[in-house]
Amino acid sequence: MTTVIAPTDDAFSPTAGAGELRLCWSPRSPFVRRVMVAAHELDLAGRITCIDTVVGMTGCHAQLMRINPLNKIPTLITDDGFVLSDTTLICQYLDGVAPSPRLFPQAHAARMQSMRWHALGHGLTDLLVLWRNERLRPEEQQHRPTIAAWRAKFAATLATLDGEAGRLADAPVCIGQIAIACAVGYLDFRFTDLGWRDGVPALSAWFAQFEQRASMQATLPSAG
Ligand SMILES: N[C@@H](CCC(=O)N[C@@H](CS)C(=O)NCC(=O)O)C(=O)O
């Protein structure tokens, strides 16, 4: 069960209580979801208090800006005085403080495979969040060539992942699969019109399995 608190000044104070981790959070962000899935996989979710933090590219969140000049979520406040922004960094932090770290493989070959998948999932998420923001603009202000390029890159990324679905299924759960699953989950949340499953049956089948994990079910996006 995720503990969510209101965005008071106190909540954003840059030191969490002993043993506590505070996460500037939204149930809609695919980046935040990646952190929360990692936390669940590492049995750390119970230590995280989520601060309800509504951000947008066209404005600044006053309290978040005081601790993170980039004004982005996720931002993690730790009990040892760190304020960490950047999803990858936060996931690495969680892996490092978990009783048994395991989402970032140590062995070079496994690590490179995992981080390569992570880069694909992360890049796809970046692209989709930009695309979503563009869609929120009035139709006549949307830049069609850029949208056409995003569409091509999205399709090419899914085709690449479709070819790797067997390896995604066979590898031990790591940050790479989590990043891909959260990106694909964002397609189901915000881009239902794209019909992303068409033409990528192996990736669809892999995701159908992966999203049954307790960590994915506990972090389903909500529009609320
Ligand atoms: N590179 C960042 C991206 C995070 C990001 O873009 N988060 C969005 C929410 S999904 C955000 O905070 N947008 C507000 C802004 O860009 O000002 C990361 O990996 O954490």
Image (cartoon, helix red, strand yellow):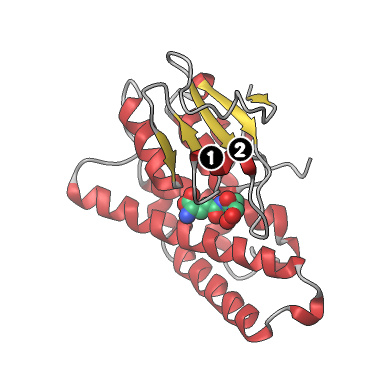
Whether the residue carrying mark 2 lies under 8 Å from ligand 1 is answered with no
Examine the rendered structure and indicate whether residue 4 appears above or below residue 88. Answer: above
Pick out the residue farthest to the bottom.
145
Q: Position of residue 199 (x, y in %)?
A: 60, 71
Marker disc for residue 63: 2
104 displayed left or right of 55: left
Residue 67 in sight here: yes
Give the residue drawn at x 73%, y 41%.
222
Q: Position of residue 14 (x, y in %)?
A: 48, 28
Give the residue drawn at x 68%, y 43%.
54
12 displayed left or right of 173: right
Q: Position of residue 117 (x, y in %)?
A: 39, 56
Which one is nearer the viewer's eye here, 1 or 82?
A: 82
Marker disc for residue 214: none
User: Label 2 sits on what residue type?
Assistant: Gln
81 displayed left or right of 10: left
Q: Position of residue 204 (x, y in %)?
A: 58, 57
Rounded to the nearest angstrom, the CA distance separating label 1 from label 2 is: 5 Å
Which one is nearer the viewer's eye here, 149 or 217?
A: 149
Image quarter (top left, top right, bottom left or bottom right) of the C terminus: top right
Few, some or many residues within 10 Å of mark 1 (<14, 14–19, 20+)? some
Examine the rendered structure and indicate whether residue 113 appears above or below residue 14. Answer: below
At numbered mark 1, what does the secondary structure look like: helix, strand or loop?
helix
Image quarter (top left, top right, bottom left or bottom right) of the N terminus: top right
Quadrant location of residue 173? top left
